[in-house]
Amino acid sequence: MNLLRPLISQGISAAKPRTFPARNPGSLLKWCLGAGTLGLACHVFAADPAPAANAAGTPAAPAAAPATPTAGAPFDWSKAPPVTAPPRPGMFSIPPTGPGYYSLWDVVTGNERQAPPVAPNAPYALMTTPAFEIDYRYMEKPGYEKDLFDPLKRIHMGEDFLLSFGGSFWYRYMRESDARLTNTSDNYHMMRSRFHADFWYQDKVRIFAEFLDARTFGQALTPAATDVNHTDMLNLFADIKLANVKEGPVYLRVGRQELLYGSQRLISTLDWVNTRRTFQGAKAFWRTPTFDLDAFWVRPMITQQSHFDNWDTKQEFFGLWGTYKPMKGQLVDMYFLSLDDNRNRAIGSNGLMGNSNTHTLGGRLAGDYNQFLYELEGMYQFGQYSNQDISAFAVASGAGYHFKGAPMNPQFWLRYDFASGDKNPNDGARNTFNQLFPFGNYYLGWIDRVGRQNIHDFNAQINLHPQPWATFTAQYHRFYLANKQDFLYNAAGAATLRDVTGQAGGYVGDEIDFRFNIHVNRQQDILVGYSKLFAGNFLKATAPGVSPDLFYVQYNMRF
């Protein structure tokens, strides 16, 4: 899968392209965002500063009212450093509970548990959660389950300083036919290593650094930008606690950092690819038991395979993101995002090239209630695309049911996803939705040929746990172009195929995806997957003879 950076390439008319003068219709919006952030900062600094206090939290409730320690008492590390729990994605599944074997190692050793164990990592080979949000605070409680790598975690240096180390290694074998909608078969190997160090002074100051090395071997096609990155930094930032406001702490983070929000349809770390996705800039964030608020300004990193990565000075990404958690298992997301792309790559009416400013307003409801599962997300975009006005939108909806107590813990989802497309490239309006920085595979198929742009997706998913340590997921997709004259866009947002006449029709095809994960032990998982895209009328006309499939086996070890 290509990284999000490649832009949509559209057909240029016979007229000779010329540079379009840069516009800045988002200046007022930037000013409003800055004013809002300043208002939050004023509120923060107006609050009574708290004495040495704890940012409390668990994966279910990442923050709680800070406790005031007794004067002269040692710092209480049982609820620090603070951790932000990963948000629920769409098509979420509810893990098994009750007595059982929760890893393959439990089966081998005969360790039947009465409940799921407390563990820092999700029992799955793919894990979008950044390493700096993995929670090891359980180690401060007596009687916790010991682990081989405990000596690397939560090393207390006196009463006020804490140091941790960790990392991960994965290997994946990939076998693709008709790779990237060509008639090429590709069999290759991917390897990724990550190591991190995390240093805290109480809950007030943090320095986090994470190394990344990603490589591939034996690829027939040129490696994608997301496949290779030799010896680089994935994260390198500092956190400073500004204050305690009401029931939660406020922090400022500066430096290179991964971002992950909401459903991950718009902003994700993208763990499926070998390199993951990262940004550089600043973020202020406030965490409470019922409400989280983030304000950020960052630039995406440019992956340079054999050189130290640098940020893209011609792209700016900023926004506000709030999450309200009225009760356990339910949430409301509200957000405003803006992407300013000044690379002179937007192709507007009559082939006129210029910059783009894409602003996204959105909201999301998600949760479970009495075994029913639900999600609804709406996104509207406006701004400027060369000499065109942007007006685009996307909707994601789904309903499911959890057959609680039934054998294999079955859960079923029915979903409909839509993202608008553009009918006429020369009418002065840009209607193709921009998916920004998503985790597209999770929603639109693991073959990576379909992105959240110009698409209808009718899909279904079933999750099963044959054993508590085994997870099986099956998905079915039926894809149609939202507009027959627009491109089919891939998971990276790149335009791939198009019939400007629309005579090829809108039926792209059907995809099936199967994944089976074996949770070996606390550190190790094995994932086996198979995906197949059956060509519809559109693919048969624009890419004759192409009907890709993908088989992969992945081993992931985290420590």
Image (cartoon, helix red, strand yellow):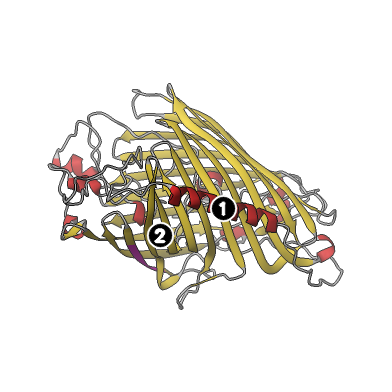
Whether residue 429 appears in magenta in the rendering, the answer is no
Please identify the quarter of the rendering in which residue 170 is found. bottom left
Q: Characterize the magenta stretch by its predominant secondary structure.
A: strand
Q: Which residues are magenta?
A: 207-214
- Compared across the picture, whether 26 is left or right of 318 comes to right
- Is residue 418 visible in the rendered image? The answer is no
- Residue type, mark 1 in image: Gly
* Residue ranking furthest to the left: 143
Q: Nearer the viewer, residue 304 or 186?
A: 304
Which residue is at 18% across, 55% downward? Answer: 150
- Is residue 63 visible in the rendered image? The answer is yes
Which residue is at 49% across, 51% downward? Answer: 42
**Label for residue 319?**
1
Q: Residues within 10 Å of mark 2 (few under 14, many from 20)?
A: some
Report the Cα–Cα distance between label 1 and label 2: 37 Å
Whether residue 210 appears in magenta in the rendering, the answer is yes
Q: Nearer the viewer, residue 5 or 552?
A: 5
Residue 466 image position (x, y, % from top left):
33, 34
**Label for residue 15?**
none
- Compared across the picture, whether 428 is left or right of 67 comes to right
- Compared across the picture, whether 51 is left or right of 536 comes to left
- Residue type, mark 2 in image: Tyr
Residue position marked by numbered label 2 in the rendering = 173
Of the two numbered discs 1 and 2 on the same chain, state the one appearing first in sequence: 2
Residue 287 image position (x, y, % from top left):
41, 45
Q: Quadrant of the C terminus?
A: bottom left
- Compared across the picture, whether 243 is left or right of 376 comes to left
